Amino acid sequence: MLLIKMMQMPHERLFRVFNSVKTFKRGFFTESHLPPVEEFKNAMSTVGSQAMILTASFSGDLDITKMHGTTLSSVSSLTVYPEPVLQFNIQVPSATSSSIHQNKYLALHILSPSSDSVKLARNFSLGSRFINMQMNSDNTNAERKHTTPFERIDKQEWELFEDVIQNDRPDSFHLDPKLHLPVLTKNSERILICEKYKVFQIYNHEIWTCKVKDILINVHEDHKTGGLLYFNRNFHFVGNPLVDPNTKKD
């Protein structure tokens, strides 16, 4: 009965206006005293999402300072036909973004839900940081230093894509011989090899769409775990399935 009464209330009485942060108390909801941006971040932290690591291709000598990557929580499937396409977003400026723009290819890693994966995800989430503190409010005079996450992990945790597939079937996808693509083989259940498709800039973020060209499967992690999840500013794993009242019992 309470639910029916709430559904009959006008929407403006159930939800306050976001932009003006008006005071509101109705039913089970209470007002937030946070500024709009912080309130938005706090609201989004209540939603779980997949944590994946992106690594970017590079050209030239095998120089670890050229190897860039970032942790993402925005990867999602966009379409399957006529070919598989994924989407995600990256905050800019970004050395990872610059690398993909220049070299076109990237790897997206579906991580196993483990402490080692958490360590990796934290490492690749550091991004860039300001090293010149004398800046305008819009950061136009700020000097950034881009982090190099591969300098902080063991060599056993990654390989080059071209080395992983060198003994595979003849029709395997191959990069341009001038390019290298580091892949995190130790803690990944699946690795999606992708090619840049279309990119759109929205304020200080880029929305990327990428075509999936190949998928590497870890033979030691061939069961489905749900991967590494990010929720409420911490990493989690998938729990037991909820009871579905529409599912018939045996």
Image (cartoon, rainbow, N blue to C red):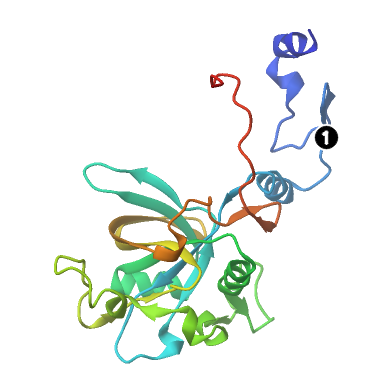
Image-based side of 224 in relation to 41, left or right:
left
In this view, which residue lies farthest toward the front? 250
In the displayed structure, 228 sits above or below 174; it is above
Residue 241, position as x, y percentages in the image: 60, 37
Residue 86, position as x, y percentages in the image: 37, 51
The structure residue drawn at horizontal position 55% and vertical position 81%, both measured from the top left corner, is: 147
The structure residue drawn at horizontal position 54% and vertical position 55%, both measured from the top left corner, is: 73
In the displayed structure, 97 sits above or below 2; it is below
Depth check, front residue: 75 or 26: 75
Residue 76, position as x, y percentages in the image: 44, 48
Q: Is residue 93 visible?
A: no
The structure residue drawn at horizontal position 75% and vertical position 22%, both measured from the top left corner, is: 14
Residue 169, position as x, y percentages in the image: 18, 68
Q: Quadrant location of the N terminus?
A: top right
Image-based side of 26 in relation to 85, left or right:
right
Depth check, front residue: 114 or 93: 114
The structure residue drawn at horizontal position 30% and vertical position 56%, both measured from the top left corner, is: 212
Q: Quadrant location of the C terminus?
A: top right
| Number of marks present in the image shown | 1
Callout 1 amino acid: Glu
Mark 1: few/some/many CA within 10 Å (<14, 14-19, 20+): few
**Residue tagged 1:** 31
In the displayed structure, 5 sits above or below 38; it is above
Q: Is residue 44 visible?
A: yes
Residue 245 is drawn in which quadrant? top right
